[in-house]
Image (spheres, helix red, strand yellow):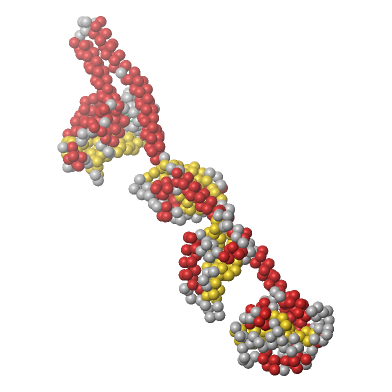
Amino acid sequence: MEDGVINQSSKESVHSLWMNSIEGVRLVDSIGNIVYVNDSFCALVGLSEEELIGKPFCYPYQMSNSNELENFENFSENIKNRKITPYYKTSVTFQNKKASNIEVTNTYIHEKDDKLWLLSVFRLGAEEFNSVDSLDSEKNESKIDSQKSGEDSSKLIKLLEYERKKNKEYENLIKAVIDNTEDVIWMTDNKLRFTFISPSITRLRGYSMEEAMSQTMEQSMSPQAFKLAISIIDKKKNLQTPERNTGVLLESEHPCKDGSFIWAESKVKFLVGENDEILGLLGVSRDISERKKTEKLLRENKNYLSKIINTIGDPLFVKNSEYRCVLANNAFCSMLGAEYSAVVGKYDFELFNPEECKAYNIEDDFVLLTGHESLKEESYVDPQGERHTVLTKKTRYIDENEDKYVVGTIADITELKEVDRLLRQSLETERKLNNMRTDFISMVSHEFRTPLTTILSSMQIVQQYEDLRKEEKEEIYNRVYDSIKKMIVLLEDILILGGTESDKAAFKPLPCDLDILCLDVIKDISLNYNQGNLIKYEIQDNLDQVVADAKLLRQILNNLLSNAVKYSLEGGDIKLKVYAADEFICFDVEDKGIGINVPDQNEIFKPFFRCFDSAGVSGTGLGLAIVKKSVDLHSGSISLKSEPGKGTTFFVKIPHLYEYAKGNK
Ligand code: ADP
């Protein structure tokens, strides 16, 4: 093809080139009559092809000041001399339409028979030629020098061809994008009637483009989705620009041709006119059915999971590495007496006693760091202030972001612990009783046999020797009395320790004269041991009248003083000092006897315990046990200070019992 010459019929070639163009194209013959217009031109001027063909080119214009009309005056002359303005911009009013910012490009076309035609391309609001950088110089030349013919017009045709191709490519690109995108692109007018729906609608909802376009927006959505979408769009519509023009994101359900429903996410923007008026909507919708399905499944799973963890009766929690609770079941919340919202998101120290938290968190760190399971006995105080012992099992969980968590289950073992404690206690009692029984049997066999043997042998002597003298008989009877007395004392001791005598019920504190009681005990001991003169006794003034269980007090003093005498082989002073200190009545019993070594000091209050070195002094090991019991019944205390070879002092403290006495009167 030569420059500027179209070998085929110009009309046909122009038609094939511009048929689908969005630019208006008009072909005019040498005397100015229209020979060809494309659809875009018809649309631009608002007239049909039939109305335009054969008419002078100025026919569609309203008579006003236009470059075109200027050109028309001497059109034949100008075309012949190539004086037609090749390119200009104008705003023009056609008979039926007003068009602003039209760019017009004129090109001469001549055929072999030298017929000269003018091809005019009208582009509405198009960019200027400047955008075609590579062709800038040529384009400017064409603009400036309208005299140049042949060569110039061929360049202009090239330029137009370039533009057309570029537009076509652009159009094709947009078409390809629209045709191939998974998303559905759609537009409506301001009455929400669809003006465009891209072909992908068929993939999405099964309807053809035409079927979808024929539906109203309401028909294209589920009723709830439509209601919601309209309310969101309306709200947005009432906003001021630019907020209004930012668009909205909708998630809605849409019916498909086969009766099913799909979920779509739509980005919707307002199409806005020059004067900011809303012309319609532009939307891009994407199928999110799969995502919705997954979300639903996740929701169901979450519900299912939370139902399961709430069914677990034991408290369960999950906390992160900052000891912050991220999940808890109902049992854990009720353990803390709090709502779920007041538990989850809270740090340990907000839920528990900070001191206890330290212990919990040491264990948490161990689990988080090592991944080892931990089983630990812990304790906490419930909202009612009751302390619970719990067994907490902790394991580590690492999520997909490599974040570490402690998953814990708690078993309340408070009751079990109590049962265990009672069981151990009764086992210990049982064990003690067994020991006592054994000790008792061996003690009885020993301590009862001696007096019984004495009685038996005395009886045999009396029986065998009837003619015994009075003094001899007297001696035998005394031996029998002593033996019987010894056995009675022993039996009493046993009764006190093991029987009902030691019961709290038997504890009867009453006002008593302490001085008389002490003197009485000292007198008894003096008679029994003939050592009364060795016992030094002092009592603080005003302490005569006290409230105490006189019987038990007597046991205490009697046993302590007897021991002091018994275990002071070399003699030496024995002191009984009675005085008041704070709320207590104190009894100090001091001797200068054999003393007790330190290990034995911890044992001597146990029944049947006797020090290895009891210096051959006979005894049952029950005396101090009875003292301890009697002191305990008074809610008092007993301690001792002793040094082997130097002596022993026992310190007994019993509280004043005035109030108790009042209550028992
Ligand atoms: P018993 O005197 O009948 O053996 P006790 O229970 O009174 O039993 O005393 C337990 C043991 O404590 C005694 O066997 C003795 O070894 C030691 N003991 C008690 N009091 C004294 C004391 N004042 N001095 C030295 N040892 C003592």
In the rendered view of the protein, which quadrant contains the C terminus?
top left
Determine the residue positioned at 24% across, 15% down.
480
In this rendering, position of residue 392 left or right of residue 604: right
Q: Does 80 sit above or below residue 321?
A: below
Image quadrant holding the N terminus, namely bottom right
Res 120 quadrant in image: bottom right
In the rendered image, which quarter is residue 212 located in?
bottom right
Q: Which of 356/492 is in front? A: 356
The quarter of the picture where residue 552 lies is top left
Ligand 1's quadrant: top left
Task: Name above or below for residue 298 compared with residue 106.
Answer: above
**Which residue is painted at 23% across and 25% down in the image?**
528
Residue 92 seen in render: no
Does any portion of residue 470 appear in the rendered image? Answer: yes
Q: Pick the residue in front: 446 or 458.
A: 446
Q: Residue at x 45, y 44 (%)?
A: 311
The percent coordinates of residue 354 (x first, y second) are 42, 53
Counting from the top left corner in percent of width and height, residue 455 is at: 27, 13
